[in-house]
Amino acid sequence: MNKFPNLPLVNLMPFSEIDEKRPVLLITSTPAWNAVKDSLRGLNIVHTIEVIEANTTHWDKLKSSREDQKFEIVYAVGGGLVADASKYIASKLNLPLAVLPTALSVDAFITAASGIRKDGCVYYIETKVPENLILDLDIIAKAPSNIRAAGITDVMSIATGAWDWKFAHEQNKNPEGMEFIPWVYNNSQSILSGVLDCAEAAGRGDRDGLKTLYDCLAMEVQLCNQVGHARPEEGSEHYFAYAVENEMGHGLPHGDLVGPGIMTMAKLQEQDTGLLEAALKSCNIPLDRIPQSVIEHTLVELPAYCLKHGLAFGLAHTLNEKIS
């Protein structure tokens, strides 16, 4: 790995104080924009596009429809899908990007890649890190309770993802470039501890709790940036989420899929799940949206799914042995 992405410059400020004179291409979703538009009168919006799909065909169509207009900056207002699409479009247009999360629902606001859905799985393509992240903690505190702090799942997945990383090391199945590094593993556990401690405050919309949740998201992302892969925080729980989405459709938020994935895999890894469950519930992550029959079917199919999509080795690859 020859380059190490950094995090965006962060401004903690009310959206209402933004005064953007440059011509803006706004990328958003209708629910997110309707929730905050009265606070963003300071944007010089030339055109608005709405993202509804997580694939490059859709994003390229949105981009090409406005290539003849003169923009100087892209603003992304919304959740993870909006952030991923905006990173792609801004990189293709060679424009700076400012991301304005309306909830701390994912870590996509600060990563250098965008997640796309392809052939029933999620793949990550290199795009860009936003130049600027504007956090209005009062806006985030008012977000719907089930997405307000749902990004906790992208930090709590350390519990199962790092377990998988160590497990793969013990099985001699980490590929070159993903070798197990004890000090990185230990640092991930410290970040996990921090996010468990702030879960209750973040879940109720407390400003300090939300700020700490962002801090943990930032440290999780930068830790992965430094080692060049996501093994410390992504494993069988995410594989479960990707696979079960094919059964449930694309209507459930990210946290509604990853949260049950964490609980399901942690139990199969024979971890104590008490603190994990308490934290997820404190952040209002639903753990009952996926029918038990769908969970069971997904677990049976998961080993083959992991092999098909070339997912890094973890417990999910061995489930036919584990649950037989």
Image (tube, grey):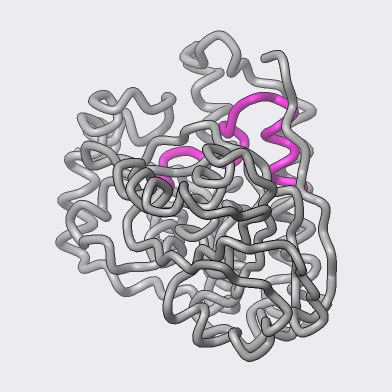
Q: Does any portion of residue 220 appear in the rendered image? A: yes
Q: Which of 210 and 292 is in front in this view?
A: 210
Above or below, comparing residue 2 to residue 22 in the picture: above
Above or below, comparing residue 293 to residue 300 in the picture: below
**Which picture quadrant has residue 112?**
top right
Image quadrant holding the N terminus, namely top right
Please state the horizontal and vertical placement of residue 63, each as a whole percent of the image. Answer: 42, 48
Please state the horizontal and vertical placement of residue 224, each as a whole percent of the image. Answer: 67, 34
**Which picture quadrant has residue 150?**
bottom right
The verdict on residue 234 being magenta is yes
Relative placement, left or right, of 303 versus 206 is: left
Q: Which of 28 and 221 is in front in this view?
A: 28
Above or below, comparing residue 39 to residue 129 in the picture: below
Relative placement, left or right, of 238 versus 102 is: left
Q: Does any portion of residue 272 appear in the rendered image? A: no
Residue at the (27%, 61%) spot, across then down: 250
The verdict on residue 178 being magenta is no
Please state the horizontal and vertical placement of residue 81, each as a whole percent of the image. Answer: 45, 58
Residue at the (26%, 55%) spot, across then down: 245
Image quadrant holding the C terminus, namely top left
Residue range (magenta): 219-238
Residue at the (83%, 75%) spot, across then down: 13
Residue at the (50%, 50%) spot, across then down: 84
Please state the horizontal and vertical placement of residue 176, each as a whole percent of the image. Answer: 56, 8
